[in-house]
Image (cartoon, helix red, strand yellow):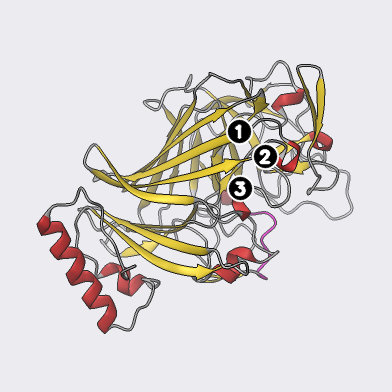
Amino acid sequence: MSDFTTSPALTRRGFVALAGAAAVLTMAGCHSMSTTESLAQLPRKKAVYKKLFGTMPDGTKIYQFTLTNSNGMVVQFITYGARIQRILVPDSNGKLGDVVLGYENLAGYMSAADPYFGATIGRYANRIANGRFTLDGTTYQIPPNDGPNALHGGPNAFDRQSWDAKEITELGQPGVQFRIASPAMANGFPGNLVVNATHVLTDNNEIIIHYRAATDAPTVINLTNHAYFNLNGPGTDVLNHVVTLNASKYTPTNNEFIPTGKNLPVAGTPFDFRAPVQLSSRLKPFPAGSKANFDLFPYGYDNNWCLNNHGSVKVLAARVTCPATGRALECYTTQPGVQFYTGNFLNGTIHGIGGAYPMHGALTLETQHYPDSPNEPSFPSTVLRPGQKFYQSTHYKFYTV
């Protein structure tokens, strides 16, 4: 295998540009296109690079894919967990900078400390109460990995597995299609499930993710991406970020982050982000040893909002802006909910690209179905049956203000 490959849909001119970029990286001593400086030298062309990223203990090779567009935006993925490793976008001065948290090497992603950085989450994103649900009269048990509950599909789920991947083009835009086959009863989930997660980078500085799945037996499914965004750049906090969520309701939870089954109005609560809110104005230290209501004294968010987008990628789901850098991010999705999380459990002990990650060092916009939906009949269904086509799509669009 050569050091890099290109999408077969690229023009000869594009191939020459890629070859030139590879030469630049080689002369700079860069083995895996890992530094911001090296990535900034890539030609401003629609292109795909593929490199060996690392090898798992069992010998499985993990690859890194780098997508570029005509505006200089760069997105990197790895096949371990079908993860987003880097997103480089310009600030208001045109300087490229990384806006997601991640690691330089495979060992970081495989470590026990990894909090799902950039991972494709499945089979079931978010929490299932007690790791248990009943489908068509049969009860299934998922191994708990978050206290008594199952989180993000349980232990060694999609985020901890190697995905197959290939370069693709979609409407002339470069992309990567990840694929995983999950056998029946993997982590206790019924049905042989095949999932495709296609990621495309457009010339509008937009990352489009398409999720498709099929099963041979009734099962439940909830997929998302767990990118940790920081428009300042990794290693800082996001308290200066201004957030808008197009949601009139949210799903309150108990102390274990399991929904109570209700959808409550956000009006008059700290969960109201229908108008832009700077996070520093909302987050407060939780009074030590007190019995204060979290809803009145939030130290951070880790909740699901019920989106008003009615399943349309043409209606805004969320917007985040950063006055310090001028960067902005908009999210559009077909999913009914978004888990907005503000890095509450980061504490400076994790060191990744950009340095140590402090508390509130990032935020997530995990577009998905509601947590614990298999146990809440009133929530939008996450059941997938044989013959049905599962499809969800999320768009992350970057720009400057």
Residue pointed to by mark 1:
222
Main SS category, magenta section: loop
> Of circles 2 and 3, which is in front?
3
Give the label on residue 126, or none: 2
Question: Quick one: label 3 or label 1, which is nearer the N terminus?
Answer: 3
x, y percent for residue 234: 50, 64
Q: Residues within 10 Å of mark 2 (few under 14, many from 20)?
A: many
Q: Is residue 233 visible?
A: no
Q: Are marks 3 and 1 in contact (CB under 8 Å)?
A: no
> Of circles 3 and 1, which is in front?
3
Question: What secondary structure is found at the residue carrying circle 3?
Answer: helix
Q: Are marks 2 and 3 in contact (CB under 8 Å)?
A: no
Q: Amino acid at mark 1?
A: Asn
Question: What residue lies at 73% left-to-right and 42% top-to-bottom?
Answer: 187
- For the residue pair 189 and 205, the one nearer the viewer reads as 189
Question: What secondary structure is found at the residue carrying circle 2?
Answer: loop
C-alpha span from label 2 to label 3: 13 Å
- Magenta span: 342-349
C-alpha span from label 2 to label 1: 8 Å
Question: What residue lies at 78% left-to-right and 39% top-to-bottom?
Answer: 142
Q: Are marks 2 and 1 in contact (CB under 8 Å)?
A: yes
Residue pointed to by mark 3:
158
Above or below residue 400? Residue 330 is: above
| Horizontal side of residue 304 vs 260, given as left or right | left
